[in-house]
Amino acid sequence: MSPTKTQTEWKLAELAAEAGVSPRTVRYYVQRGLLPAPPFKGPDTVYGEEHLQRLKAIRVLQARFLPLDAIQVELTRLSPEELKALSEAQVPTDILPPAPTALSEPSPASGVSTPGPVQAGRQLPVTGYRRWELAPGLELHLADTADEKTRALAERVRALIEQSEER
């Protein structure tokens, strides 16, 4: 009886299926720098173990509600051993966000299960967000389901930023 051979190289579709993402997401992550480019491009392109580990680690970090920029920083600082451990962490698949999309004003939540306001002991579903760029590199996202107190706080923060820019 021969030992079971573990796969160390995958075609794009195989890698995506193994990681639970779409092939388009894999290409997007390579473009963004979250994944290294495969060593060869073309019909015979193969992805290695590091690609799979990074994809799984990205999914774990997304489940922790980190944005892609923060995920990229986190992946950069991890040692190979830490990356492997993170990629093997168990994550409930019902809370994983879909593949990233471009932001718009306001941006819909697209079914992303994120913590929303709690009312009478239960969480309200978030249907969308209002997004404001307060300063270069600083954004404020306000859920459509936010209560009045939270909305007022967001408006105060925006007003403070505008006042500081006028000076």
Image: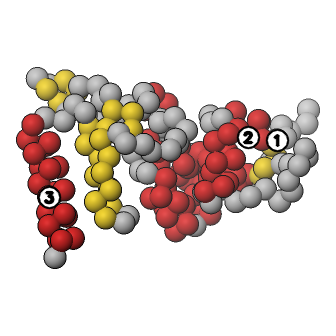
List the residue tagged with mark 1.
Answer: 11
The three-letter code of the residue at mark 2 reads Leu
Image side of residue 17 versus residue 65, left or right: right
Disc 1 crowd, CA 10 A, few/some/many (<14, 14-19, 20+): some
Q: Nearer the viewer, residue 6 or 22?
A: 22
Disc 3 crowd, CA 10 A, few/some/many (<14, 14-19, 20+): few
Image side of residue 105 versus residue 160, left or right: right
* Residue sitting at x 14%, y 63%: 160
Res. 70 image quadrant = bottom left
Q: Say which quadrant the C terminus sits in.
A: bottom left
Image side of residue 32 versus residue 104, left or right: right
Image side of residue 3 versus residue 103, left or right: right
**Secondary structure of residue under mark 3:** helix
The three-letter code of the residue at mark 3 reads Ala
Res. 124 image quadrant = top left
**Place of residue 27 in the rendered image (x, y in percent of width and height, measured from the top left):** 69, 47
Q: Is residue 80 above or below residue 156?
A: below
Q: Nearer the viewer, residue 2 or 150?
A: 150
**Secondary structure of residue under mark 2:** helix
Q: Say which quadrant the N terminus sits in.
A: top right
Q: Is residue 155 visible?
A: yes
**Place of residue 77 in the rendered image (x, y in percent of width and height, measured from the top left):** 52, 68
List the residue tagged with mark 2.
Answer: 15
Residue contact between numbered discs 1 and 2, judged by CB atoms under 8 Å: yes
**Secondary structure of residue under mark 1:** loop
Q: Which mark is residue 78?
A: none
List the residue tagged with mark 3.
Answer: 159
Q: Is residue 53 visible?
A: no
The span from disc 1 to disc 2 (Cα, nearest Å) is: 6 Å
